[in-house]
Image: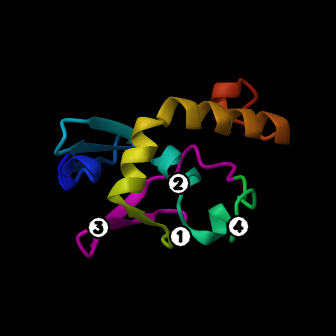
Amino acid sequence: FTMAQQHPHPTEINLHQKSRMLEITFDDGAQFAMSCEYLRVNSPSAEVQGHSPGDSVLQVDKEDVNIERIEPVGNYGIQIYFDDEHNTGIYSWDTLYRLGSNKEQNWQDYLQRLKEAGAPHSELGNAKS
């Protein structure tokens, strides 16, 4: 076991603003494509996650959110600037890897929370026209 295996680093980060997708390739070969919405609603920032576990704030109406720019933070992560003015989330490589690895589960959890909150989303078939 080398340190590199425990903490994968990205070899490539591509932002596709048209399709609102962020693609990340890690040095262990893992490749993830995550939507801007997915990254936005799972922002590691305090205003989304809250200050203690179970404190997280449900993010709604983020289907059209896009990423304006991405800036490196040291050599451990990136800061993502979203076009809804949200830019306080620092996404470490570990966080991005975890978000990528658990995308399906996280996304279903998110849709479930929206459903319970009665919030509109196109994937729930209750979007505002």
* Residue 60 visible in the current orientation: yes
Query: Disc 4 to disc 1, how far (Cα)?
Result: 23 Å
* Residue 129 visible in the current orientation: no
Element under label 2?
helix
Residue type pointed to by label 4: Ser
Which residue is found at the position 18% from the left and 36% from the top?
29
Please state, as top left, top right, bottom left or bottom right, where the C terminus lies in the image: top right
Instruction: Please state if 100 lies on the left or on the right of 107 as rendered.
Output: left
What colouring does the structure picture have?
rainbow
Tell me the mark number nearer the camera, choosing from 3 and 2: 3
Which residue is found at the position 69% from the left and 67% from the top?
50
Kindly identify which numbered label has been placed on residue 85. Answer: 1
Residue type pointed to by label 2: Arg
Element under label 3?
loop
How packed is label 4: few (under 14 Cα within 10 Å), some, or many (20 or more)? few
Which residue is found at the position 23% from the left and 51% from the top?
13
Kindly identify which numbered label has been placed on residue 40. Answer: 2
User: How far across and how far down the image is residue 120, in percent?
Assistant: 75, 37
Q: Earlier in the sequence, mark 1 or mark 3?
A: 3
Q: Which portion, as a residue range, is magenta?
A: 59-85
- Residue that numbered label 4 is attached to: 52
- Residue that numbered label 3 is attached to: 76
